[in-house]
Amino acid sequence: MTEPRQTHPNPSPHAPPLEAVTIPGCAPGADGLALAAVAQVRSGMVVGMGTGRTAARAVRALAHRYKEEKLDIDCVSTSAATETLAKELGLPTVPFADIELVDYLFDGANEVDFQLRMLKGHHGAITRQRLVAEVSKRCVYLAAEDKLVQRSATLPTSSPVSNERFNGVAYRSFGIFLLCRSVDVYNWYCRETLKLALKTDPIIIASLQKAESRIAREISKAVKQQRNPVDALTKLLDGKSSMDWAVRDAVHERLNVVQDPETELICLCRNVLVHRRGYDEFDQVAEALKNLGTKRAQIYSVAHPAGHMPISLGPNRLLTMDGNVGLWACDFLHNQIHLMDQNFSHVYKLPTKRWRPRPIGRAWIGGTDA
């Protein structure tokens, strides 16, 4: 949308014709550009208001229509300055966080060339401007004649804004989140399988007593106090006690439910990330990688080749983490749970309709499926 103009020096031969805007009933001397920007605003709309001198003209024109025509609208501002102006003019404003969709947005432009390519914003309000534009059904940009350029004089001298120094940190954080979240879900799964097995086949108490862990001590304590060991152990598993390793040991070593070789390494990495800030202070990860050697799971996701091992230690024994490692751990533990589900249900004859493991896919823990 542009103001009326006659000619412009050195127009591009490929430039589309820019015709003057005609506003019915526009009095001489009225702000035709601003009136044209708000001409299609109707009652019931959520209107996005841009930022800058040109957008401010449209805000004033909208306020005039609001008062004269008694429009029923809600206005969303793209900056604090616009919101202040709107309130001064009596426009009803709502916080951006309270709306899901904007029907109509008007804003200004910094530069527009003769192929209608626009440079929009390089100031502090650009983030809110882009957010509001993203959820707007229609966006209209105002450009006065002095904004028309043959070739952008700003872009060649503008310094690019790079997120490169932050991308590595963000990708590492994403990987840490995926790995830790997937291990937490896996530990939850192991607890639930053990509780269900106790209810289905109480005879497994004898197998669990052989373990040198808190689980075995809890069973012995219950027997001495003449309490039901199943109830005592179930109560312990329902509590907030940190006994994930003991539960995994009970499920895999005492009950002989299959666990892939890499699983304990992934769980160990989670503990190092959470409790040691990612530093392998006691060489636990290094020792686990050495002991693992070339042993690998038999069932693998198609996304990863056989023998794949993305976990490694960098300088100063820092655990190397990024999104690829996190996604691998997520896929791996998803497959591990599927494998355990089949094995556990077969060995302990668990009814299928009662056994629905919680999904551990990328979408569930916060990632995205490819």
Image: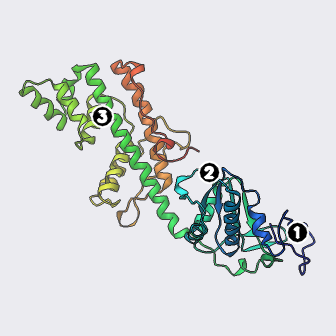
- Distance in Å between CA atoms under marks 1 and 3: 72 Å
The mark lying in front, picked from 1 and 3, is 1
Disc nearer the start of the sequence (2/3)? 2
Left/right placement of residue 104 relative to residue 16 reads: left
Left/right placement of residue 174 relative to residue 140 reads: left
The mark lying in front, picked from 2 and 3, is 2
Disc nearer the start of the sequence (1/3)? 1
Q: Which residue is drawn at 38% across and 47% down?
A: 266
Q: Residues within 10 Å of mark 1 (few under 14, many from 20)?
A: some
- Distance in Å between CA atoms under marks 2 and 3: 43 Å
* Residue type, numbered disc 2: Leu
Q: Residues within 10 Å of mark 2 (few under 14, many from 20)?
A: some
The mark lying in front, picked from 2 and 1, is 1
SS at circle 2: loop
Q: Nearer the viewer, residue 47 or 303?
A: 47
* Residue type, numbered disc 1: Ala
Q: Name the residue under label 3.
A: 191
Residue 26, picture quadrant: bottom right
Disc nearer the start of the sequence (2/1)? 1
Residue 102, picture quadrant: bottom right
Q: Mark 1 points at which residue?
A: 20
| Residue 155 percent coordinates (x, y) | 71, 77
| Residue 180 percent coordinates (x, y) | 38, 49
Q: In which quarter of the image is the N terminus?
A: bottom right
Q: Mark 2 points at which residue?
A: 101
Q: Which mark is residue 44?
A: none
